[in-house]
Amino acid sequence: MIVKLRDLRPFDKNAAEDLVKQDHGLHPDDRYLKPGRIPHIWCPGCGLGVVLTTFIDAVRRKNLAIDECAVVSGIGCTGRVAGYLDMDTYHTTHGRAIPFATGLALARPDIHVTVFSGDGDLFAIGGNHLIHAARRNVNIKVICVNNFNYGMTGGQVAPTTPMGAKTSTTPLGNAEPGFNLPYLARASGAVYVARWTTFHPRQLAHSIAQTFDKKGFTFIETVAPCPTGYGRPNKLGAGLDEMRYYKEMSEIRNGADPAEAAITLKGKIVVGTFVDVERPDFIQNYTDIILAKAQSRAKPSGEGRAA
Amino acid sequence: MPEKEVLTGEHFIHGDAACAEGSLAAGCRFFAGYPITPATEVAERMARRLPQVGGVYIQMEDEIASMAAILGASWGGSKSMTATSGPGFSLMMENIGLGMMTETPCVVVNIMRGGPSTGLPTLIGQADVMQARWGSHGDYGCIALSPSSPQECFDLTIEAFNLAEIYRQPVFVLGDEVVGHMTEKVVIPPREKLKIVPRQSPNAPKADYLPFDTRGDLPPPMAVVGTGYHVHVTGLTHDERGYPVITDEVQERNVRHLVDKIRRNAHNIIRVESIGLEDSEVVVVAYGCTARVARQAVEDLRKRGYRVGLLRLVTVWPFPSQLIRQISSRVRALIVPEINYGQMAYEVERTSCGQTQVVLMALMGGAMHTPEEIVETASEFL
């Protein structure tokens, strides 16, 4: 077979670097962002910029060494967070950020592994992985940005979409109930569960900072506006109007029972830190039980056996 | 300190256990898997052995998660492996694609059973060969090794780890139920006799390092987590820095690199075994457990004075196209016994370019060919 290929245009490292130099470094947070990755792809009014800034704020507050931080994300608008941060970042397949992060965190228990992903990624296609990672108490910090729909693909119904809400695939209103994420995370075994909205960046930064001190599976739901995908069909207004809604309808109830924190369309949003408990994480149990037994039982085996 | 990593000596173990021992000898320190017949014994052996060498064993919630976890562990700096069979291999395809796109070294053992779907869980099949080559969407190069004995399960698992490190991608050990469950003598050499390719780290300064450089025939060394290189690893089409760039121009470089790194080095990767290719009138092309039967048939015929040869594919991928083309110009027939309804036979037919008769001896699964059947088919052309 004769194969015809177009001429390749090789990667121009210098041109790429020149482009980066044009505007990188102007903002104080730029040292936390990969050079040349901004502007981001998110829509005007989207809550993801707030969450990204808040995460940076938490890293700064805890004075974490950037080389000891890693972010893993799945697919979707939130999945793009990883690519903007100037640390070791992994943008994986749809729903699989948690099992990828599990491998990363178990291979390097000294690294702070944060999973950033959306509600659809973590609770629909990736729901099984989330409950099992929580059960095992793998040392990963999950930040779920919940915008109640699939934003990247244009506003389809998600497992978090409240009953009655309109999306591009529920034009007559959603007839399914949505998941109550903190309740599910707690029931699955998360040692830290909180919910904030993007109207609460300080509380959110505080929560994220708290999770860096915890060993085990932590879960923070961040309710975020999606004026393009979710706000428009449900007549919630622009991003700013959604922020106003969060301001008026959020009720801070730290320590509240997550069972009572379900979210409804245009209803009240219970926010706060709901769960903060201690339980040995996977690697601790593995080290104390499995590795300890294996080391004590190990027999000399260098000789092999006769066939 | 007794040697726990390389169990030097003679062992009487099955192929699944030999895969596990091969991985440990190659430096595997992370295994994630999910039980599935006939590959479960790999996981069972790893569950017992990995803690002895300080490695991590984890049983995940499914094969999708297992594959994702070994990629994560590889970026965590551990050599990693999973083991499965057909249905699990299907589930792994998504993250095998991620491993190809992100150039992540790891090893996937597939102990093939009869399919499709649940098929024959406990019985032999060889019907995943094309899935191994083409199973995940998009274009990428593929390396798959096919052991014919428990000894080779050990040897080729080490080889798979070495190739995974050199070419920075998932590599398949494509065993089958017969070889996986067959118990034979396995000789594990002393550690210093083993050829192990260690994980390479970049030594370029951060400003000069391109984690997904496409310029060379081989990928650059991998900057794993925590080394300060701040690599972005994505399944999206990406430039040499790892940054997502959704253009046809970058797609050309990205994908051609993934395919060409194997294509250009195929001559270094391909391994075959042969008997009498020089003088043969008929050649039997076989792999895996089927190659054992084929060898018996060829030896029987040669003893009786017939000029029959054997070409055994040790690497099923990359495929030895040039060799097949050369042989086919001088033989009357190429006979391909395989336990599927025609997979490698099509590859043999395609690469023989119509120069000779290609005969597929197909079994759907659950049983092996007999040497007599192969003798009989070969005799038709002698």
Image: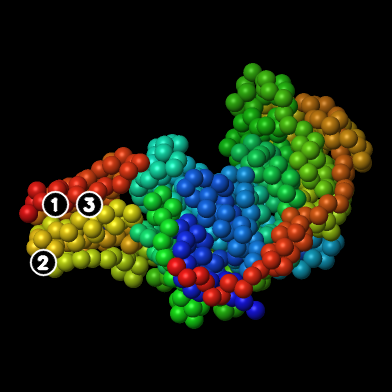
Q: Nearer the viewer, residue A158 or A258?
A: A258
Q: Given this view, does label 3 or label 2 mark the residue nearer the observer?
A: 3
Amino acid type of the residue tagged 1 in the rendering = Ala
Q: In this view, does B264 lie above or below A211?
A: below
Q: Are marks 1 and 3 on the same chain?
A: yes
Chain to which mark 2 belongs: B
Q: Is mark 2 on a helix, strand or loop?
A: loop
Pick the residue in front: B171 or A94: B171
Q: Name the residue under label 1.
A: B378
Residue at the far left in the pictured view: B382
Q: Can residue B212 be seen in this view?
A: no
In the rendered structure, are the residues bearing label 1 and label 2 in contact, judged by CB atoms less than 8 Å apart? Answer: no
Dot 1 crowding, Cα within 10 Å, few <14, some 14–19, many 20+: many
Which quadrant of the figure has residue A179? Answer: top right
- Point 66% across, 39% down: residue: A127
Subunit under mark 3: B
Task: Specify the farthest residue to the top.
Answer: A172
Of tags 1 and 3, the one toward the viewer is 3
Q: In this view, does B115 lie to the left or right of B8?
A: left
Q: Do the residues labelled 1 and 3 touch (CB within 8 Å)?
A: no
Residue kind at label 3, given as amino acid type: Pro
